[in-house]
Image: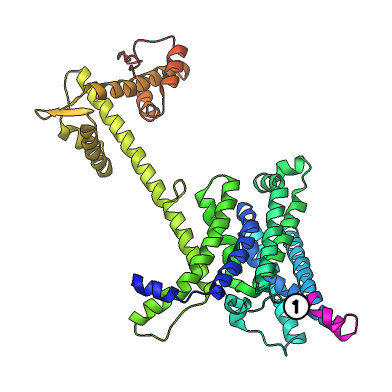
């Protein structure tokens, strides 16, 4: 299969390189404003804008065509004016979308998602209606609109340079968005995380939000022609959402989103050339020889997101489960050390069966106790002699720290909260796992260095490291 994979890539040409470059530039241009939409919890706004700008595109197209028919502009300047009119129409409709959604939310007292839904369907329907009434004779390829056509968009080059026009347009939008982020990074960050504080400092978060919407609308129009509606939405949200799972710092989140957008473009095109023919030839459909790059890019972005959702070091589902399991195991191990220490105080060392089959433990705690005993034996914390579990010198030192934390906290609660002795133990069993040497020293100093806890049991000295 590996040899077959490289066989399909052996025909790679400059045409494929420009497809990847164009897709990467458009994806990265979308990812920059997408980072701040994700942080502001306005991800749905990206989907809304990608549809409502249709009305602005239609208005810009019809307006420029009317100027041409009326003799206001020359045919030679028509293409440039048409593109400018489409950009302007999309930006204006993007601003109107935000203003209308806010008005519906305030006046109608509806939630933000419902307000966006009302504005989204209304403006998108108005765009479709306008196409039907005024531009019905123009053929619109639904596949091109939905999935994009990087494969043909790169054929439209600028003069004799061989550089695709879509690469220049999307590269220009990436440069503009990058400059906006660099110049107004502080304002964007503050208005995204704390708009009230930004308003107090005079940064006018409403204006910043409007600038972000303008940049998003312009980016959508620039990318719409080459990558289509589906990929515009995917690249606007999925790489930033994935980057959010991978980093807790905004600069790194922005860099991660750019990297992921470029990664999706490269491997989206590679997989579009190789995966469908390899898979479908084995399923009895050898005539399938490839897939749309845009659709495969969206698939790669989705795979990256679910990979981060599962395996992200700090926010991944599996990472959290592993962390909680480790935390439970540590708590159980410390509880076992404390139990053995208290038993050795009374000269009645417990057996392994007594520790594991304690009636107060649930089945999950019993399994963790068994595993904790195995690990503590491997680490040299406990030994088993004649059926009894005993602490080693190293284990005794750790157990003394746990019991010392427990009894100091019981003494602290007894003095300052004046609780009955029966209510002290349960709380101290939780707190004992979180007290470090500095906190134990502070507690001991606060309590005038007591020698025993409220039940009269001796408080162990601080273990020597």
Q: Does the stretch in magenta take in 204?
A: no
Q: Nearer the viewer, residue 250 or 388?
A: 250
For residue 274, say whether it is visible: yes
Residue annotated with mark 1? 58
Instruction: Please tell me whether mark 1 sits on a helix, a strand or a loop.
Output: helix
Q: Nearer the viewer, residue 169 or 142?
A: 169
Q: Residue furthest front?
A: 160
How many discs mark residues in the rendered view? 1
Determine crowd level at label 1: few under 14, some 14-19, many 20+ residues with C-alpha closer than 10 A: many
Indicate the position of residue 441 as horizontal and vertical percent values.
43, 16
**Up-down: is 164 above or below 288?**
above
Give the residue displayed 71% in from the left and 76% down from the top: 159
Give the extent of the magenta segment: 67-80
Q: Does the stretch in magenta take in 69?
A: yes
Q: Quadrant of the C terminus?
A: top left
Give the residue displayed 45% in from the left and 12% down from the top: 445
Q: Quadrant of the N terminus?
A: bottom left
Quarter-of-image position of residue 122: bottom right
For residue 220, say whether it is visible: no
């Amino acid at each position: 299969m590996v040899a077959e994979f490289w066989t399909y890539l052996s025909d790679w040409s400059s045409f494929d390189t420009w497809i990847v470059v164009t897709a990467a530039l458009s994806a990265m241009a979308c990812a920059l404003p997408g980072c701040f939409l994700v942080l502001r919890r306005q991800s749905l706004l990206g989907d809304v804008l990608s549809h409502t700008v249709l009305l602005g595109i239609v208005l810009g197209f019809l307006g420029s065509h009317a100027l041409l028919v009326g003799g206001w502009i020359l045919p030679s300047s028509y293409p440039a004016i048409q593109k400018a009119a489409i950009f302007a129409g999309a930006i204006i409709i993007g601003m109107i979308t935000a203003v209308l959604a806010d008005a519906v939310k305030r006046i109608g007292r509806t939630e933000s998602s419902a307000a966006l839904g009302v504005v989204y369907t209304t403006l998108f329907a108005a765009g479709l209606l306008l196409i039907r009434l005024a531009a019905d004779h123009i053929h619109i390829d639904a596949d091109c609109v939905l999935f994009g056509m990087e494969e043909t968009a790169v054929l439209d080059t600028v003069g004799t340079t061989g550089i695709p026009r879509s690469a220049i347009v999307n590269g220009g939008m990436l440069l503009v968005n990058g400059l906006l982020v660099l110049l107004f990074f502080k304002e964007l960050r503050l208005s995204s995380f704390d708009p009230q504080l930004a308003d107090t400092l005079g940064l006018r978060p409403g204006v910043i939000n409007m600038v972000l919407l303008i940049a998003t609308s312009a980016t959508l129009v620039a990318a719409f022609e080459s990558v289509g509606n589906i990929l515009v939405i995917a690249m606007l949200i999925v790489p930033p959402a994935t980057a959010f799972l991978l980093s807790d710092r905004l600069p790194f989140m922005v860099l991660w989103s750019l990297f992921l957008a470029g990664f999706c473009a490269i491997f989206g095109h590679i997989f579009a050339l190789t995966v469908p023919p390899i898979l479908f030839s084995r399923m009895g459909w050898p005539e399938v020889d490839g897939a749309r790059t845009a659709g495969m890019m969206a698939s790669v972005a989705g795979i990256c997101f679910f990979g981060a959702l599962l395996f992200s070091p700090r926010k991944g589902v599996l990472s959290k489960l592993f962390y909680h399991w480790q935390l439970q195991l540590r708590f159980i191990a410390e509880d076992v050390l404390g139990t053995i220490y208290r038993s050795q105080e009374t000269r009645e060392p417990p057996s392994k069966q007594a520790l594991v089959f304690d009636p107060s433990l649930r089945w999950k705690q019993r399994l963790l106790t068994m595993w904790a005993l195995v690990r503590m034996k491997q680490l040299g914390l406990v030994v088993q002699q004649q059926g009894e579990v005993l602490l080693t010198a190293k284990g005794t030192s750790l157990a003394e720290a746990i019991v010392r934390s427990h009894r100091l906290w019981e003494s602290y609660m007894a003095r300052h909260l004046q609780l009955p002795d029966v209510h002290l133990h349960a709380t101290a069993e939780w707190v004992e796992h979180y007290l470090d040497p500095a906190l134990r020293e502070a507690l001991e100093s606060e309590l005038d260095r007591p020698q025993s806890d409220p039940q009269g049991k001796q408080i162990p000295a601080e273990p020597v490291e």
